Image (tube, rainbow, N blue to C red):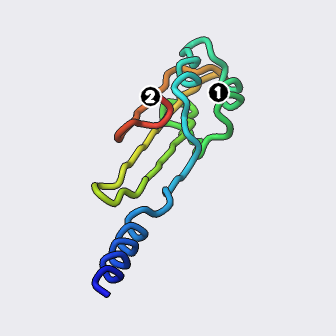
Amino acid sequence: MKYVLVVLISVIALSTGCGKPYVVGTPLEKAKVDQIVPGTTPEDKVVEMLGQPEKKEMTPSGETKYVYSYFEEIPKFWTKNEVRKNILEVYTKNGMVSKYDFRREGVNSAGQ
């Protein structure tokens, strides 16, 4: 009986700590982001490479800001959950990329 109880507790502990990953967005591949060259890459090319942005807005300086993001949380039984987050902000003016900011956070950030 004690053996069955130990096995049952182990199974319950493992099943509650190893859930499915929670994912929002599409991973941003660093190789594609590296193809963006300010002053050279047209905004149409950015959308062609990365798809439609999560958000598109006008800045006070008259630039168009495209925001792409990716978030992933992987449950871990034996330690803290693994979290990866990537954010890409692309600024365009007159149909060309003027600048961009790519940030990656978390352990083994996606898209490396």
Question: Disc 1, disc 2: CB below 8 Å?
Answer: no
Q: List the single residue furthest toward the bottom.
A: 1
Q: Position of residue 70 (x, y in %)?
A: 51, 44
Residue found 40% across the figure and 58% down from its top: 75
Q: Nearer the viewer, residue 54 or 25?
A: 25
Q: List the single residue furthest toward the top.
A: 40
What is the spatial separation of the Cα atoms under label 1 and label 2, in whole angstroms? 13 Å
User: Helix or strand or loop: what does disc 2 sit on?
Assistant: strand
Residue tagged 1: 46
Residue found 29% across the figure and 57% down from its top: 78
Q: Position of residue 49 (x, y in %)?
A: 67, 28
Q: Nearer the viewer, residue 26 or 64?
A: 26
Which quadrant: the N terminus?
Answer: bottom left
Judge from the rendering whether residue 50 lies leftward or rightward of residue 1; answer left or right.
Answer: right
Residue 19 drawn above or below residue 68: below
In which quarter of the view is residue 2 placed?
bottom left
Judge from the rendering whether residue 39 lies leftward or rightward of residue 3; answer left or right.
Answer: right
Q: Position of residue 29 (x, y in %)?
A: 55, 30
Residue 42 drawn above or below residue 104: above
Residue tagged 2: 101
Q: Residues within 10 Å of mark 1 (few under 14, many from 20)?
A: many
Residue found 36% across the figure and 75% down from its top: 7
